[in-house]
Amino acid sequence: MPLLLFLFLIWIAGFETVTYMLQGGITHQDFAGHKGTIHTGDVQWMTAGRGIIHSEMPAGEGEQKGLQLWINLSSQDKMIEPGYQELLSDDIKTAEKDGVEVRIIAGKSMGVQSPVYTRTPTMYLDFTLKPRAQMNQSIPESWNGFVYIIEGEGVFGKPASSPVTAHHVLVLGPGDGLSVWNRSSKPLRFVLIAGQPINEPVVQYGPFVMNTQAEIDQTIEDYHYSKNGFEMAKYWRSQ
């Protein structure tokens, strides 16, 4: 299980980050004055847009475990104002049937829709299967997706496939739905993440994700000279 050690100050632009806490908590703050703490089961969906400088630090002692996903923004959304959506654990929609429980962070499962607005159409589902449970999840035909196994082991795709254990990633092909069997004596937990391809060129420089090298160069210049969205960066320090 990946460990999130939030001991840094970073500037980002052109995409979104989705932070899902599995254990512990983090305190987040940015140069626009936003500050908050998320705990086990909470989600922070941050849109960097044209640029944001922020820090993430452990909230308390002990291990801080979680997942952080980067979601690219389309060219029409890369220069929007930064923003946040935060979901407390109790506010995340859930559904359960035949030994399968799902937390619906984004998208839809078992007829239940998440309230999260996704600029890039996205599915983010946290499944737990009891021993001997089986499930099927549809995925839009044109989408790309992957599975990350948090704990346990399961059979993915076809009944004759070999079991896959925790901390492995399975990349799904376009048009694949997802079928899973838990044939073990312990619960299986995994996240299914999928999204609609943007089909635009991607140029990345560290935490800047744009469509062209010229846009990357401009973003670096904006950061260094505190302009075009980075005006508050020059004197800001995390607390």
Image (cartoon, rainbow, N blue to C red):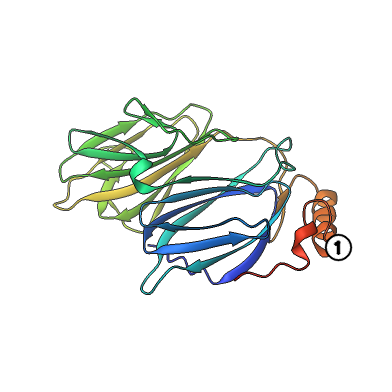
- On screen, residue 137 versus residue 173, left or right, reads left
Residue at 50% in and 33% down: 174
| Residue nearer the viewer, 28 or 117 | 28
Q: Which amino acid does label 1 sit on?
A: Tyr
> How far across and down, in percent of the image, does residue 24 sit?
37, 64
Task: Pick the residue in front: 118 or 60.
Answer: 60
Residue depicted at x 83% and y 57%? 222
For residue 54, above or below residue 174? below
Name the image quarter holding residue 231.
Answer: bottom right
Image spot of residue 102 (x, y percent)? 31, 39
Q: Can residue 207 be seen in this view?
A: no
Identify the residue at image location x=38%, y=56%: 168
The answer to whether residue 189 shows anywhere in this view is yes
Looking at the rendering, in which quadrant would you find the C terminus?
bottom right
Element at label 1: loop
Q: Residue furthest bottom?
A: 61
Q: In this view, does 165 lie above or below 171?
A: below
Q: In this view, does 89 lie above or below 134?
A: below
Outermost residue on the front side: it is 33
In the figure, is residue 226 to the left or right of 119? right
In the rendered image, the vertical position of residue 139 relative to residue 224, given as above or below: above
Q: Badge 1: how crowded within 10 Å, few (<14), some, or many (20+)?
A: few
The one of 176 and 112 positioned closer to us in this rendering: 112
Q: Name the quadrant of the N terminus.
A: bottom left
Please state the horizontal and vertical placement of residue 182, each as a whole percent of the image.
Answer: 21, 44
Q: Which residue in the structure is indicated by mark 1?
A: 225
Figure disc tally: 1
Q: Residue at x 15, y 46 (%)?
A: 131
Q: Front-most of 211 and 171?
A: 211
Q: Horizontal and vertical percent for residue 33? A: 64, 57
